[in-house]
């Protein structure tokens, strides 16, 4: 049983605040103009940076909790996947990439859940962390969408998105292989 003070510590509070930003992303659907796109991209980027902050605080001060292990990857997926889904109807991201990314996330979550029920903990891999960072950069650029200082943010975002997509597929396969090897032991 997890004590209340352990559950609602600083890292978990930061993670919950990250999740609370998700409803604000819907503004992009209703007002995808230059101002709101830039503002939401900045909000998205700041919230994404807090992902590294809460992890650092949790490890540095030994505040790692079961709730944090559950909420942190969930918050990442909620924020990134919601942003990607919301950019489909305004033509900023291909639906097929979003669909495959979400399917991969569900499969990986399923693998991790099955492993957990068997007493096996599969940590987030380095590839998965690289995938998340690439997704954050891609989504931020795609949210901005409009040119900044002569740079076509949409083209930049799509280039990074394709890199993130390759990492998405590769890291998903990596999770499956790790899981398969562990259950065969």
Image: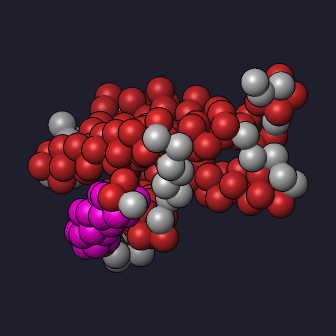
Q: Quadrant of residue 171?
A: bottom left
Is 88 contained in the magenta span? no
Considering depth in this image, is 148 or 131 the residue closer to the camera? 131
- Residue 60 horizontal/vertical position (percent): 83, 60
User: Please, which residue is most extreme toward the bottom here?
Assistant: 150
> In the image, what residue occupies the spot 18% across and 44% down?
99
Q: Quadrant of residue 49?
A: bottom right
Q: Which residues are magenta?
A: 157-182
- Residue 163 horizontal/vertical position (percent): 28, 72
User: Please, which residue is most extreme toward the front here?
Assistant: 185
Predominant SS along the magenta part: helix
Is 171 contained in the magenta span? yes
- Residue 67 horizontal/vertical position (percent): 65, 34
Quadrant placement of the C terminus: bottom left
> In the image, what residue occupies the spot 26% across and 49% down?
104
In this rendering, the answer to whether 175 lies above or below 170 is above
> In the image, what residue occupies the spot 57% across and 38% down?
70
Visible residue check, residue 66:
yes
> In the image, what residue occupies the spot 74% across and 34% down?
13
């Amino acid at each position: 049983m997890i004590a209340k003070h352990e559950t609602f510590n600083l890292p978990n509070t930061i993670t919950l605040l990250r999740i609370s930003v998700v409803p604000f992303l819907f503004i992009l659907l209703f007002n995808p103009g230059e101002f709101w796109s830039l503002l939401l991209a900045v909000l998205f980027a700041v919230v994404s940076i807090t992902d590294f902050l809460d992890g650092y605080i949790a490890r540095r001060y030994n505040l790692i909790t079961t709730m944090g292990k559950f909420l942190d990857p969930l918050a990442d997926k909620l924020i990134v996947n919601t942003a990607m889904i919301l950019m489909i109807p305004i033509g900023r991201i291909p639906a097929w990439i979003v669909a495959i990314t979400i399917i991969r996330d569900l499969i990986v979550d399923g693998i991790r859940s099955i492993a957990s029920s068997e007493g096996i903990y599969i940590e987030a891999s380095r590839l998965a962390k690289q995938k998340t960072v690439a997704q954050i950069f891609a989504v931020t650029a795609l949210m901005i969408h409009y040119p900044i200082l002569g740079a076509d943010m949409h083209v930049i975002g799509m280039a990074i998105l394709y890199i993130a997509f390759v990492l998405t597929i590769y890291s998903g396969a990596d999770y499956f292989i790790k899981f398969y090897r562990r259950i065969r032991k």
